Every structure is written in structure tokens, then in C-alpha cells.
Image (spheres, rainbow, N blue to C red):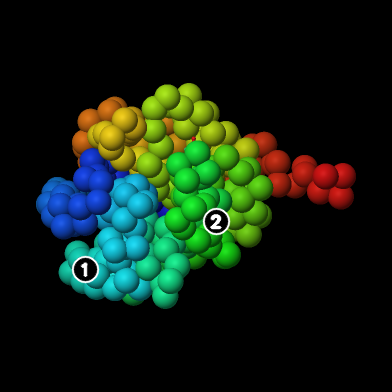
């Protein structure tokens, strides 16, 4: 199936730290809400580490072993509702390692791709508890070349550029990005969209864990850099339609991929 338009719903949810049962229940109710609208979404996205939050000191006991529970539930949901899912990310236990992993499901419930965060965020001690992924996240979603990255990854322009050079026109970014760095969040996401002339779809959590508060502001940014949807700081489902033909239009108008001089840099 190839299409140029996609309706995307972002579950901008609160996350209970260290309480996977509560988080599963919250996710289930928001997923049901997202598909009970007259016009169903083609894709649903959630935030980073939605199963456990940043309960890093207990992450070995809380993480989803081999992602089995998450995969079973989301695979069934995507098949039943024939919807693509970018399953936020989860804390996933693989042997002795814990990874911060996105599973992406197609409309038939198959895992189309997975991606584990490659840049660990030292300000939140991620490198002490988590193992970094070693591969990039790129796949085809309804025939559209798509990339995935997680939160801190947006600070590394090389990564989104590589995904764009490899063909991605659409980039998903699940996150748990807190105050006081709203300015960085919005600016970096816009920059990734403008410099790569691609759609950027970011889903951030809301709520507070300990002394850290998360501001939401999930965004859908078009390839010209305009925010076509942006959440506030409350729990909500944000929906927007992206038209991938706009990527080609912008890339024709200002042909940066033809004008690059990679032999000089
Ligand atoms: O880079 C930042 O400021 C936030 C990153 C972050 O919170 C994360 O990667 O979990």
C-alpha cells in the first residue's frame, strides 16, 4: 500500500514512574479513544519509556523481558484496528542488558522495525543503566520511507541527515523531554525538519516524576518547518494529517540534497 497522506495520532500521555500496570492501563484507554473517532488514524505514536518511566534504579526488575508483553499487546491492537503503531519506546530487557527500544507495527500486526536509542543521555544517568543500540531505525510505513529516533537523538544532526540521505521523508521521535529545555526541544525539532526537508512527528510525555516535569508540546512539523500541530502541557491526543507530496515539493523548491558538497565536509 502506497499513499501520500497519513492521519497521525499522538498519545501525549502522563507516565507513572515504576508502574507498568498503570501505564499499560492508561495506554489501553488512550488507544481505544484514538481509534473510536469517525476518521480513524493511519498511525498512532506514543512517548519514550512509556511502560516504566525513568525508574532506572529498578529497571532490571521492571523492564519488559524481550519486549514480549508489549509486542503481544500492540501486535494484536494494530491487527484488530488495521493501524500502524510507533510504539513509543519501552524499557526492554535482553539477557542482562536493558535497552530503550521502539517497536513499529504495520497494519497487520507485524513488527516492521525496531530501534534502540543509540545516544544515551548522561544528564539522566542513562549510560549507567542502559545499553546503547547499534543500528539505525529506518523502514517503510504504508510505502513511505520512514525513520525513527528517540529524544536526545535529535541533538545529533548527523543521524537525521543520514536517515534522510537513505531516503526517509518522515521521522518519528518519541521522547521524555523535560523543563526547562522547551526552547531546545522546539528549535531542534524544527531544525531537523527544515534542514532535511522532511516531516518530523514528535511525541513527548506530560506530568511530573519526582522533581522533573515534562512539558508535552508534542509536534507535527512539515518539511517547510511549520508546526501543523502542537500540544500544550496537558494529557491529550493530538491528530494531524501529513501529505508526503509536500516533501517532494519543498525538495524541488530548494534542492539542498543536490546542492550539498560532501567532499568538502
Ligand atoms: O537532550 C535533552 O535535553 C533531553 C534528552 C532526554 O531527556 C532524553 O533523551 O531522555
The single residue placed furthest to the front in the displayed view is: 57
Rendering coords of residue 46 (x, y %): 31, 50
Which residue corresponds to the image point at 32% horizontal and 49% vertical from the top-left? 55
* Above or below, comparing residue 228 to residue 31 in the picture: above
Q: Residue at x 21, y 37 (%)?
A: 236
48 lies left or right of 116: left
Q: Quadrant of residue 63?
A: bottom left
Say whether mark 1 is within 8 Å of ligand 1: no
| Residue matched to label 2 | 118
Q: Quadrant of residue 134?
A: bottom right
- Secondary structure under the numbered disc 1 in the rendered image: helix
Residue 240, horizontal then vertical, whole percent: 32, 41
- Whichever of labels 1 and 2 marks the residue nearer the N terminus, that label is 1
- The N terminus sits in image quarter: bottom left
Give the left or right position of residue 231, taking residue 220 as reference.
left
Residue displayed at 86% across by 50% down: 263
Q: Position of residue 3 (x, y in %)?
A: 41, 59
Disc 1 versus disc 2: distance between alpha carbons? 25 Å
Q: Which mark is residue 73?
A: 1
Q: Secondary structure at mark 2?
A: loop
* Viewer-side residue, 127 vs 67: 127
The one nearer the camera, 262 or 127, is 127
- How far from the left and from the top, in percent, is residue 252? 64, 42
Q: Which residue sits at x=38%, y=42%? A: 176
Give the label on residue 108, or none.
Answer: none
* Quarter of the C terminus within the rendering: top right
Name the one closer to the observer, 112 or 119.
119
Q: Is residue 229 visible?
A: no
Amino acid at each position: 500500500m502506497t499513499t501520500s497522506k497519513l492521519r497521525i495520532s499522538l498519545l501525549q500521555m502522563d507516565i507513572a514512574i515504576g508502574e507498568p500496570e498503570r501505564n499499560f492501563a492508561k495506554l489501553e484507554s488512550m488507544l481505544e479513544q484514538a481509534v473510536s473517532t469517525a476518521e480513524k488514524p493511519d498511525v498512532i505514536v506514543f512517548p519514550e519509556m512509556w511502560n516504566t518511566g525513568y525508574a532506572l534504579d529498578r529497571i532490571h526488575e521492571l523492564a519488559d523481558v524481550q519486549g514480549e508483553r508489549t509486542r503481544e499487546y500492540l501486535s494484536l491492537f494494530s491487527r484488530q484496528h488495521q493501524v500502524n503503531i510507533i510504539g513509543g519506546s519501552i524499557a526492554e530487557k535482553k539477557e542482562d542488558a536493558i535497552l530503550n527500544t521502539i517497536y513499529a507495527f504495520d497494519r497487520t500486526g507485524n513488527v516492521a522495525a525496531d530501534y534502540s536509542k543509540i545516544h544515551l543521555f548522561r544528564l539522566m544517568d542513562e549510560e549507567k543503566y542502559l545499553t546503547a543500540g547499534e543500528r539505525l531505525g529506518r523502514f517503510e510505513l504504508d510505502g513511505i520511507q520512514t525513520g525513527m529516533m528517540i529524544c536526545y537523538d535529535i541533538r545529533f544532526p548527523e543521524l537525521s541527515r543520514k536517515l534522510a540521505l537513505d531516503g526517509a521523508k518522515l521521522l518519528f521521535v518519541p521522547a521524555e523531554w523535560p523543563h526547562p529545555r522547551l526552547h531546545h526541544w522546539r528549535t531542534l525539532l524544527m531544525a531537523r525538519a527544515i534542514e532535511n526537508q522532511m516531516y518530523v512527528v514528535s511525541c513527548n510525555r506530560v506530568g511530573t516524576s519526582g522533581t522533573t516535569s515534562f512539558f508535552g508540546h508534542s509536534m507535527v512539523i512539515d518539511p517547510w518547518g511549520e508546526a501543523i500541530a502542537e500540544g500544550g502541557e496537558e494529557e491529550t491526543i493530538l491528530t494531524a494529517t501529513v501529505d508526503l507530496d509536500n516533501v517532494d515539493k519543498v525538495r524541488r523548491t530548494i534542492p539542498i540534497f543536490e546542492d550539498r558538497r560532501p567532499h568538502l565536509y
